[in-house]
Image (cartoon, rainbow, N blue to C red):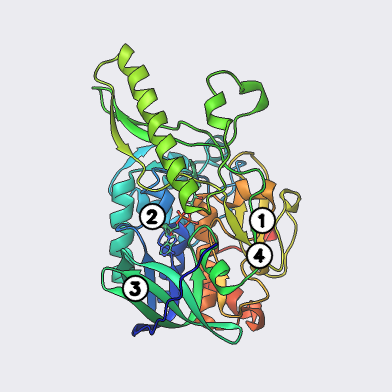
Amino acid sequence: MEKVVETLCTPITHECDVLVVGGGVAGIAAALAAARQDTKVILLEKQFMLGGLATAGLVTIYLPLCDGKGHQVSFGIAEELLRLSIKYGYEDRYPTAWLENGSMEERAKKRFEVRYNAQLFAIAAEQLLLKEGVTILYGTSACSVAMASDKISAVIVENKSGRTAIKTKSVVDATGDADICVMAGEKTALFGPGNILAAWHYYETGNGYDLSMLGYAEVPQEDRTEETKPLISRRFQGVDGQELSEMMQLSHKRVLEEIVKKQQENPAYMPVTIATIPQIRMTRRIVGGYTMETSDDRKEFEDSIGMIGNWKKRGPVYEVPFHALYGSRVKNLITAGRSISASDAMWDVTRVIPVCAVTGEAAGVAAAMTDDFESLSVAKLQKKLADNGLKLFYHEL
Ligand SMILES: Cc1cc2nc3c(=O)[nH]c(=O)nc-3n(C[C@H](O)[C@H](O)[C@H](O)COP(=O)(O)OP(=O)(O)OC[C@H]3O[C@@H](n4cnc5c(N)ncnc54)[C@H](O)[C@@H]3O)c2cc1C
């Protein structure tokens, strides 16, 4: 490939203790948790709203905080954000049994999940982070890192002011795609099978609006028909600019086809909102000290930082080991959200909103405590998480 040489001298415009890159659910949780440890936190978000896939991507179902058998398994900021998402109104699936003192029997029947309004969640999250003293830089993309030995000393960003640097003690990679890990030379892995096309959108029928979940996580073999073929005929990896642009264009085309089809039955059928970021699920992840597996159900980890359920199945409970969040090469870099270390099969469990919040909270607290994750006292981290109201081990349920 032909190359050009740039000579750059980048001014440092900001300094902080914890730099969180990416303002999706993982980044929101990380920034919130770090700020509550009395550290100076900057959150970078390349869009002009918070929430990532959970707002701009129109994924508005806060999947369960419970195990499907009536026990809550995810606590702390994961629960706080679920409640915040519906503070000003919900859209669907209100978890009455969980929020209004339902019995164990009722809780076992209905999972602790909710469908919220994306706009209200984004604004409420912004208000909360500002109240906690987080500096939010919107329209700001992290595009490179400056290294000092095996640590990131500054993150290079681009926004309306041009190209500048932010000095930081530690970095939380909440980009969803492990982008900072790649920039810093941390070990990463790609999602093997690739993603199917999604075209989730909101529509109006003349009788109110609703969410169309066009393009489910995977199309099971038995449902593969002529109609579902276009959804699975091409797979997307999600780490190439050109490929993502094509994916977005195909997704738009799919929405239009759907609208035209539905208008034949009901002329009032109109799109209300389409996603403004690519709806891609599993792309690239860190290769952590431990890679989570679906067989880890009820496995005990000494360094557990919280528990998660399985949105697809009732029963499984997983402890999340701290060393699934960081690698061995870059000492002051940790990841949270859909880029933690999980096998291809387990990724479908770990990528969802409550898990992003659980891992975000742990990453944020840890980043406030150290600039060398490997040598952090896990017992001290666990004490702080427990003080925040989290249950860390299966035996505590
Ligand atoms: C079609 C689809 C359906 C889904 N359905 C559900 C569901 O029903 N329920 C559920 O719980 N989960 C669902 N998920 C998964 C879930 O929505 C996401 O995995 C989760 O929201 C990811 O959160 P995150 O914070 O890790 O990443 P993201 O939401 O991807 O956030 C990353 C943020 O980082 C920003 N960013 C990236 N790079 C940079 C950079 N270099 N500089 C600055 N900012 C940057 C992005 O703009 C983005 O805002 C679904 C996902 C998809 C795609």
Pointer 4 with pointer 1, Cβ within 8 A? yes
- 228 with respect to 293 (left or right): left
**Above or below — where is 248 with respect to 353?**
above
Closer to us: 343 or 80: 343
How far is disc 2 from disc 4 in space, using C-alphas? 23 Å
User: Which quadrant of the rendered structure holds the N terminus?
Assistant: bottom right
Q: Which mark is residue 324?
A: 4
- Mark 4, secondary structure of its residue: helix
Q: Residues under labels 4 and 3: Cα distance? A: 26 Å
Type of the residue with mark 4: Ala
Q: Residue furthest top?
A: 265
Q: Nearer the viewer, residue 201 or 329?
A: 329
Number of numbered discs:
4
Please provide percent x and percent y for residue 245: 43, 46
Write down the residue under mark 3: 134
What crowding class fits label 4: few (fewer than 14 Cα within 10 Å), some (14-19), or many (20 or more)? many
Q: Which residue is labeled 2 in the image?
A: 51
Along the line of sight, the residue nearer the viewer: 264 or 109: 264
* Disc 1 versus disc 3: nearer the observer: 1
